[in-house]
Image: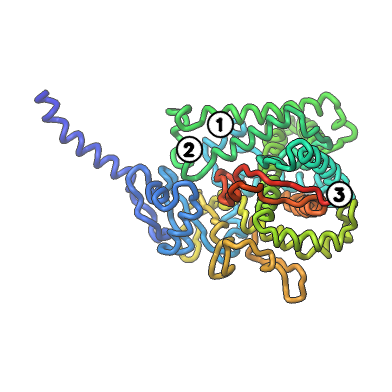
């Protein structure tokens, strides 16, 4: 015991000095200002003190003191947060700010490799995958109204039928909990595989739930793996890594199964019918080049990761935006009434929206823009990373820095929007009553790394809202408290489950 007491104090001092030297090692000069990080945990405690579940609100609050280019320490991860539109518009379009932050934890989703299009490196393979995807999707009708309208209308017909059935079964009261996920997944699936699933298909129902659970589990402040990715090896159950690995396996197995089906059909060998076929055809061509020493990014693992990325980025965000829109409309009935009056005037009853109708739906497009602003499905953009040592606003940004763009801050900027917490589509209407876009609304991102699915998302949202308003009225359920408009926070923000009284209009 005496021996222990003799050595314990010096050992403790040495340990403390070691930890301090590791945690407060010399940092580069002229980094952006930020709160003083605490040993080991960085600024996690300060973030939790301000807002324990919504990091983007905490960042916005901190920016009042530290500015719109701010340093933050998330456990073992150093990051810089952009908090203004001006900073994002100037820097996120530059190549040196166009890489993706990526670590070993993120690679677990894609076979322990940096695959797919969302998180791939800026130069290669991202640019090659982007060119291939855009070219192939366009070849099969992506972005072409005459090709996409029938696909969207087929989904809408089933949505309308399902809602009418539920109205009869449940006295008009419908629970909205991922209600549009299957439909929007089918839209994406039509683009990628040239097929669709029935809305009751158990495999697709399971896939949507797995994707939803994954998105809900990824929050910068509540998911410890953002701050301490190495903990996934030490505490897989405690950190949720075991559950996430199960999710990764289920989604990858699902998409691999689809790839296997397309391979067995062998259409890719002579007449590719969709993106998956074209990718398989490219794999076959590249296999012939291997003997010449050429490395190829076209592999089956890359294909599975690519398809997974399209679903993760496109389907759930569109479904959440639609659910947000209906929630805002039932809590703002005067907006819903004005919206229905415009649609009744422009689109004949019993018909779908056409190309000729679209430019006449000024208030409808304004309502969607306001939904994208206030619903804020992606309040923190997909993380960027610096490709090299660079500067931003006069501050030094080291290569590999984790860069977060706080779009929630620009969507709720009181100096610009005046009443950002009010759902008011009129802010997107000019003096002549026409729709006007706003450059500060950037739901699909900045620069070349903006979302590839913007065209499909914008078109489908307009069609869905028009059809829903044309056929139904969404009301608060009598004798129930109004549904909350606070978000269900995760990697994306969707509304909490809510109930609505739905009435057929005709």
Q: Earlier in the sequence, mark 2 or mark 1?
A: 2
Q: Earlier in the sequence, mark 2 or mark 3?
A: 3
Foreground of the two, 473 or 319? 473
Which mark, residue 225?
2
Answer whether labels 2 and 3 touch (C-beta < 8 Å). no
Q: Is residue 168 visible?
A: yes
For label 1, the SS is: helix
Crowdedness of circle 2 by 10 Å Cα count: few (<14), some, many (20+)? many
Which mark, residue 244?
1
Give the label, 2 or 3, closer to the camera.
3
Answer whether labels 2 and 1 touch (C-beta < 8 Å). yes
What residue is pinned by disc 3? 149
Q: Residue furthest front?
A: 479
Is 419 located above or below residue 193 in the figure?
A: below
In the rendered image, residue 48, in percent from the top left (x then y), is placed at: 41, 48
Name the residue: 70% across, 51% down: 475
Is 128 located above or below residue 373 in the figure?
A: above
For label 2, the SS is: helix
Q: Tell me how the rendering is colored.
A: rainbow
């Amino acid at each position: 015991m005496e021996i222990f007491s003799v050595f314990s104090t010096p050992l403790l001092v040495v340990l403390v000095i070691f930890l301090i030297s590791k945690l407060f090692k010399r940092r580069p000069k002229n980094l952006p200002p930020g709160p003083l990080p605490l040993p080991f945990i960085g600024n996690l405690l300060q973030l939790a003190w301000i807002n324990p579940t919504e990091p983007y609100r905490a960042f916005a609050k901190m920016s009042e003191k530290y500015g719109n280019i701010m340093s933050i320490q998330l456990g073992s991860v150093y990051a810089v947060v952009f908090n203004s539109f001006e900073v994002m518009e100037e820097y996120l379009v530059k190549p040196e700010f166009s890489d993706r932050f990526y670590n070993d934890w993120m690679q677990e989703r894609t076979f322990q490799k940096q695959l797919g299009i969302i998180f791939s490196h800026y130069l290669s393979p991202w640019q090659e995958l982007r060119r291939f995807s855009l070219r192939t999707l366009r070849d099969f009708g992506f972005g072409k109204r005459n090709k996409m309208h029938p696909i969207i209308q087929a989904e809408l017909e089933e949505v309308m039928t399902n809602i009418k059935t539920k109205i009869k079964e449940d006295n008009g009261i419908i629970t909205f909990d991922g209600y549009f996920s299957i439909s929007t997944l089918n839209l994406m699936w039509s683009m990628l595989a040239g097929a669709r699933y029935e809305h009751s298909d158990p495999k697709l129902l399971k896939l949507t739930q797995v994707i939803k659970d994954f998105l809900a589990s990824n929050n910068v402040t509540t998911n410890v793996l953002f701050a301490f990715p190495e903990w996934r090896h030490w505490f897989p159950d405690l950190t949720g890594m075991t559950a996430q690995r199960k999710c990764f396996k289920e989604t990858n197995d699902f998409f691999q199964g689809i790839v296997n089906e397309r391979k067995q059909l062998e259409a890719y060998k002579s007449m590719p019918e969709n993106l998956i076929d074209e990718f398989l055809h490219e794999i076959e061509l590249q296999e012939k080049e291997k003997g010449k020493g050429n490395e190829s990014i076209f592999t089956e693992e890359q294909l599975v990761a690519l398809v997974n990325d399209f679903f993760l980025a496109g389907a759930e965000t569109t479904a959440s935006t639609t659910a947000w829109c209906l929630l805002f409309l039932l809590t703002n009935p005067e907006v819903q009434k004005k919206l229905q009056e415009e649609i009744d005037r422009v689109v004949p009853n019993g018909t779908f929206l056409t190309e000729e109708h679209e430019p006449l739906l000024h208030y409808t497009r304004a309502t969607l823009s306001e939904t994208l602003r206030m619903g804020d499905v992606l309040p923190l953009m997909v993380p960027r990373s610096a490709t090299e040592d660079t500067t931003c606003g006069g501050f030094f940004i080291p290569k590999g820095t984790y860069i977060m763009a706080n779009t929630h801050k620009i969507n709720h900027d009181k100096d610009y929007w005046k009443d950002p917490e009010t759902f008011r589509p009129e802010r997107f209407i000019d003096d002549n009553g026409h729709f006007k876009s706003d450059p500060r609304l950037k739901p699909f991102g900045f620069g070349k790394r903006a979302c590839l699915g913007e065209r499909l998302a914008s078109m489908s949202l307009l069609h869905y809202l028009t059809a829903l308003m044309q056929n139904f009225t969404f009301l608060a359920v009598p004798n129930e408290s109004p549904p909350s408009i606070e978000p269900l926070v995760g990697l994306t923000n969707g509304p909490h489950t809510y109930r609505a009284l739905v009435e057929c209009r005709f």
